[in-house]
Image (cartoon, grey):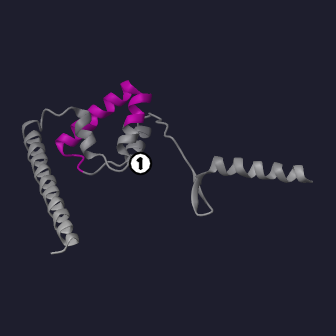
Amino acid sequence: MTEEDKELEILKAKRLAEMEKNLAEQNNQQEHETMLSNSSQNKLLPRDQIIKKLGYRGLEVLSNAESQFPNETKLVVEKLAELIQSGEIDEVLDGGKLLTLFRSVGISVRMENKINVEKDGKFVSISEKFVKQTDDSSFEDDEI
């Protein structure tokens, strides 16, 4: 075997050992999560029950609602947890659905908005694009 082959074999062995270690850690973590979920299924806080059912941007909406309307959100969270526990709600709650729910009960949660536009193959915020356009136009005015 050449020296390069030996180095390659050593690297392969290290990578295999690393992969086996990661797999063992993953299995241990799954077993731990299974034990926790079995032992504390009914002991979960209402917020934790809802977090398990949240989908895309759901946690962001929930966090914004909690920071803006803590008392009202607590009531909604408790009722939602009851509905989830009873099985009346079994679908994933994404951010849009959760935002609609809050707004339907009169809680107007404000979300951060950001508009990006493509310029020269890159995405930039629309405010940056406007600033650059005004800078360019003022430069043109100076030349005239």
Report crowding for label 1: few under 14, some 14 to 19, many 20 or more residues within 10 A (C-alpha): some
Residue 21 at x, y percent in the picture: 13, 53
Residue at point 22%, 36% (across, down): 82
Q: Is residue 47 above or below residue 93?
A: above
Residue at point 37%, 24% (across, down): 71
Quadrant position of residue 105: top left
Q: Nearer the viewer, residue 23 or 86?
A: 23
Is residue 64 on the magenta stretch?
Answer: yes
Residue 55 at x, y percent in the picture: 32, 49
Q: Nearer the viewer, residue 117 or 2?
A: 2
Q: Which residue range is magenta in the image?
A: 63-90
- Position of the C terminus by quadrant: bottom right
100 sits to left or right of 4: right
Q: Nearer the viewer, residue 126 or 101?
A: 126
Residue named by callout 1: 96
Label 1 sits on what residue type?
Answer: Gly
25 sits to left or right of 105: left
Residue at point 19%, 74% (across, down): 2
Extreme residue in the right direction: 144
Element type where label 1 sits in the image: helix
Quadrant position of residue 8: bottom left
Residue 74 at x, y percent in the picture: 32, 28
Q: Main secondary structure of the magenta part?
A: helix
Q: Nearer the viewer, residue 22 or 115?
A: 22
60 sits to left or right of 53: right
- Position of the N terminus by quadrant: bottom left
